[in-house]
Amino acid sequence: MLIHDTAFSPRIGLAYYLERTGTVFRASYNRLFDTPSLENLLLSSSPDAAKLSSDDDIPAVPVPAERQDMYEFGVQQKLGSRLRLDVRRYVKTIRNSADDEQLFTTAVVFPVALSHADIRGTEVRLDLAPVRGFSAYASYANARATDTGPSVGGLFLGGDEQGVFEGASNFPADQDERNEVQFGVTYSHRSGAWLHFTGRHDSGLPTEFDPEEFSGFDPRIQAQVDAVRSRIKPRTILGIAVGITLWRDSRLSPELQLSVNNLTDRFYLYNFHSVFSGTHLGRPREFQVRVVFDWQKRQ
């Protein structure tokens, strides 16, 4: 609403299927043009709000649009008649990297932009086609996300992130997670009943806090933070869901579902004192019951 801007945004993709081995090679290039989020965009660029900053020399600057070049290379391989392996490598180079900043300790967030960002990683996924009612998948992702200052748009309030907004140094982005593993196993019975068991392991996101404050944290927080590595400690969260279709011959075909998230009721942190995202606790064990109706046309 404050900046008029345009960009050329092509997408190019190419895939080649090698029938003899059941292999698919693919590559793509995407040039993306993203406008900043609208939530509190005017606040982020307000000269009056800039008076709240601890540094009077840095004015509020309108947030520019983000420009991103994304390259992806992948291969998909059939392994026998039931397995499929997929490997993907991607690289993203970003100018005017968009993020959200928090207004002190309130729930108000507003968009900001940093000079550059670099995100690159590798993803591997293995899928099992249904065998006697069973199907499954497992995936692994390794990524590195780096932001580079200084701030090029948005409201700067100072404080712990002052070096981030003023300097040109590199630092781990809030989403910089090196290792992530997920799996799921599903069993479907011909009666309409099914069971789905899932798990996820995360190596932990970066944190940003004064080491002298660590001893004053809640003991549960201390147990989840690696103060030496400045990262959240690894965690594994499990979940299970079951369901059954009732009155399968009816028009509505209602399905009763019960799920349990965070099966072991583990206390964990999603992020903690991160540069932009603040602190979020993981959800405790929760039970969900749903009834799903599927309206079907009569034959």
Image: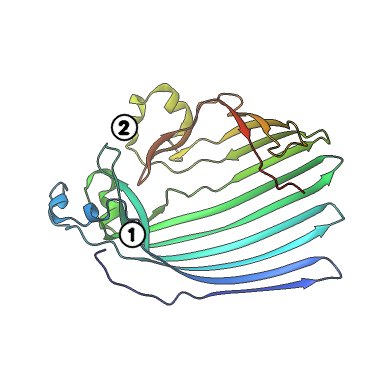
State the residue in front, 215 or 101. Answer: 101
Residue, disc 1? 114
Task: Assign a secondary structure to mark 2.
Answer: helix
* Lateral position of residue 110 relative to residue 237, left or right: left
Of callouts 1 and 2, which one flags the residue occurring earlier in the amino acid sequence?
1
Q: Position of residue 75 (x, y in %)?
A: 71, 64
Name the quadrant of the N terminus. bottom left
Front disc: 1 or 2: 1
**Quick check: 271 above or below 84?**
above
Amino acid under disc 2: Glu
Q: Position of residue 109 (x, y in %)?
A: 30, 46
Q: Sort mark 1 into few (<14), some (14-19) or many (20+) by Cα contacts within 10 Å.
A: many
Residue lying furthest front: 298
* Residue located at (46% from left, 74% from top): 9
* Residue located at (61% from left, 26% from top): 263
Residue, disc 2? 212
In the drawing, what numbered circle is on residue 196? Answer: none
* Lateral position of residue 46 relative to residue 72, left or right: left
What separation in Å lies between label 1 and label 2 (alpha carbons)? 28 Å
**Quick check: 95 above or below 206?**
below
Amino acid under disc 1: Leu
* Residue located at (36% from left, 42% from top): 208
**Quick check: 259 above or below 296?**
above
